[in-house]
Amino acid sequence: MPSAVCVQHVQKTYDKIPVVNDLSFTIESGEIFGLLGPNGAGKSTTIRMLTTLTRPTEGQIEIAGYDVVRQPAEVKQNIGVVLQQTSVDNDLTVWENMELHGRLHHITNPRRQTLINQWLEYVELAQRRDSPVKTLSGGMKRRLQIARALLHQPKILFLDEPTVGLDPQTRRRLWEIIRDLNRQGMTMLLTTHYMDEVEVLCDAYGASQPGRIGIMDCGKLIELGTLQQLKANHGEGLLMKQIGDRFEYKFFPTLDDANAYLDSLPDKTGMMVRPSNLEDIFVELTGRQLD
Ligand SMILES: Nc1ncnc2c1ncn2[C@@H]1O[C@H](COP(=O)(O)OP(=O)(O)OP(=O)(O)O)[C@@H](O)[C@H]1O
């Protein structure tokens, strides 16, 4: 079986400036993969290339074994896409949005109606099927986007910052939906700025093994692995030292190592030890905080 996503030496340049640079990675079928990176790192451009919305300048991308440049129709059949900009039509009703998407994908009736009902039920929008989309909350619109992306039964779902701008309850509900879909075998690639989102979601991979996290910066993939692998690489213990109004961070292989180091210091003023987390690793690697 081909990999769900296979990216080899991909470059994308705008005005001769590379915004994605020699990017290579694969995602296996059933995997959940979180792509992190500061603003402008190239995450959205990467998703746009993977989903046939923009062409790579160089390199090769295969989705479910199909080439994104030569076989875009086959790629589109295999993928569902939820992009940052809410792309549902505000002037249509919930059902009309689903119906339009189903027709565009040549899903014939009665199967189209069965699938529309099934996915609206799944994202808890069945009661709102006749509501104009403009009357829905942000979270409902995002759920509709997901239902619509799933209508043609794709194998791989791409989600670009799926929970941005949503309240905590709605975010958690979307996390449940994403994890549940992954448990059912759906391959997922999502980008996000939220560390907790990656920690929660990349803990999944069909509930049997953890998903992986890729960290992009300046168009390059600078780290790749499970959360445990990332922590093992960078250190599981962290010493924080307050200097004026900022902190310095020092990683140690284990929490015990960090504590032993702190114990050995005669002056412990402004210092504390704690387990490291993904945000610590992200800031260490990219040198700046996400906004
Ligand atoms: N159509 C375009 N024309 C020119 N430059 C572009 C275009 N699209 C993206 N860029 C540039 O490419 C770089 C990467 O942008 P991209 O949106 O992929 O980053 P990102 O990691 O998704 O950022 P964010 O987290 O802010 O969404 C940025 O410098 C952006 O200005």
Image (cartoon, rainbow, N blue to C red):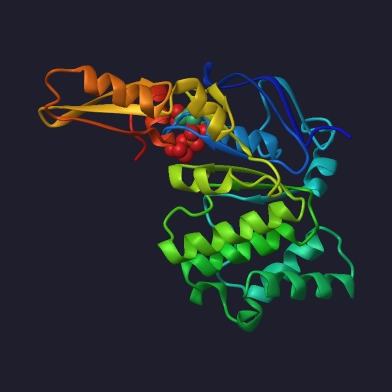
Which residue is at 42% across, 56% downward? 165
Left or right of 287? Residue 207 is right
Which residue is at 49% across, 77% downward? 135
Q: Is residue 115 visible?
A: yes
Left or right of 269? Residue 169 is right
> Front-most of 174 and 235?
235
Which residue is at 70% across, 56% downward? 181
Write down the quadrant of residue 47 in the picture.
top right
Left or right of 131? Residue 218 is left
> Front-most of 232 and 88?
232
Looking at the figure, which quarter contains the C terminus? top left
Left or right of 150? Residue 38 is left
Query: Residue 90: where, in percent of width, then height?
Result: 55, 68
> Front-most of 220 and 248?
248
The answer to whether residue 230 is above or below residue 179 is above
Which residue is at 82% across, 75% downward? 113
Figure label count: 0
Query: Residue 189: where, in percent of width, then height?
Result: 64, 42
The answer to whether residue 47 is above or below residue 166 is above
Looking at the figure, which quarter contains the N terminus? top right
The answer to whether residue 231 is above or below residue 114 is above
> Front-most of 182 and 35?
182
Query: Residue 289: where, in percent of width, then height?
Result: 33, 33
Query: Residue 270: where, in percent of width, then height?
Result: 14, 30
Q: Is residue 216 visible?
A: no
